Amino acid sequence: MEGENGLPKGAHPSFARVIEQKRRVKENLSGIKHKIGIYSAKGGVGKTTIAINLAYAISSKGLRVGLLDADIDCPNVTMFLGMGDKMDPHAPLRPPVKDGVAVASTAMLVDEVKKPIIWRGPLISKMVSDFFEHTDWGEIDYLVIDMPPGTSEVPLTTMQLLDLDGFILVTTPQKIAGINSVRSGLMIKRLNAHILGVVENMSDGKPSSSTLEAVNSLGTELLGCIKDDGRFNTSSDSGKVPVLEYNDMLHGFDEIVNRILT
Ligand SMILES: Nc1ncnc2c1ncn2[C@@H]1O[C@H](COP(=O)(O)OP(=O)(O)OP(=O)(O)O)[C@@H](O)[C@H]1O
Ligand SMILES: [Mg+2]
């Protein structure tokens, strides 16, 4: 028998709270046409690099784009972008704009970006859900979300609270990265979210057998390969966006962008 909100009668009040929060998040994000998470349970495969460059590659098509750094305790996006901007912590949070892309990160809410943010899980989850509920993105075409590694707090909260178009799984040619992609993809499926496809990063241009195995075992598609290129490091070390600096790097994202936009 159903009670309020489609919940079974007598369901624990915390279920109703989650459903109510999901409703508020949906309402706050109603001006966003598409939401994409960039994810891998494995650290260091290039999630942040892909999220940033993909956001700017989509923006270069004339679309309105936002970039959310959901790596709450280890935010890197602002450093990659050379942004020193701060956000007024009072809701609604208003993301500053860099080269046409609106960017929000916890790094904009702390005094000193190099200091560690040492928070327990519940606070991290609270912060990420506050971001979803209280950031004013206005009317945009795409929100790209840079996810932290792991299969707990932030990935879980994001998969539960947001109705995303889906997640792009980032992997590298390494066998271990492929195995972790499968692990990441299974989590997404378990939570009834979607996998948009896999990107092989730090690639030689041709997907490795481990990447192809991961793609097949998840029943998804390969969106493209991004080459191992030292300019990703030198560009971001100087706070520049690689795809805005180098045309060939922008074209390296064409295949992925075209698959996403169609
Ligand atoms: N295609 C590439 N070619 C060369 N270097 C790359 C490439 N992609 C990423 N890198 C470098 O690899 C390092 C890790 O990248 P990045 O921070 O994007 O990974 P991540 O998955 O977001 O890491 P974390 O799990 O810590 O969030 C960075 O120094 C980045 O500049
Ligand atoms: Mg990262």
Image: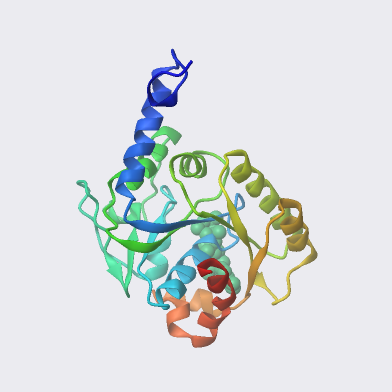
Side of 129 relative to 1 (left or right): left
Query: Which residue: 36% across, 57% down?
Result: 32
Outermost residue, front side: 1
Q: Number of marks in the image?
A: 0
**Residue at the far bottom in the pictured view:** 247
Residue 17 pos. (x, y %):
36, 27
In the figure, is residue 34 to the left or right of 42? left
Q: Residue at x 46, y 46 (%)?
A: 163
Image coordinates for residue 252, horizontal then vertical, percent: 57, 79
Can residue 113 be seen by looking at this rendering?
no
The answer to which of 235 and 250 lies nearer the viewer is 250
3 shown above or below 106:
above
Residue 221, how many percent across, how many down?
68, 62
The answer to whether residue 69 is above or below residue 3 is below
Residue 31 sits in quarter:
bottom left
Residue 63 lies left or right of residue 260; in this view the side is: left
Residue in the image at 41% along x and 33% along y: 122
Camera-nearest residue between 24 and 151: 24
Residue 125 position (above or below residue 169)? above
Q: Determine whether, in the image, residue 212 is placed left or right of residue 193.
A: right
Residue at x 72%, y 54% (from the top left corner): 219
Query: Can you see residue 155?
Result: yes
Q: Looking at the image, which is closer to me, 207 or 22? A: 22
User: Quadrant location of residue 136?
Assistant: bottom left
| x then y, percent, for residue 157 | 46, 40
Position of 29 relative to 238 (above/below): above
- Look at the image and name its color scheme: rainbow
Of all residues shown, which one is farthest toward the top? 10
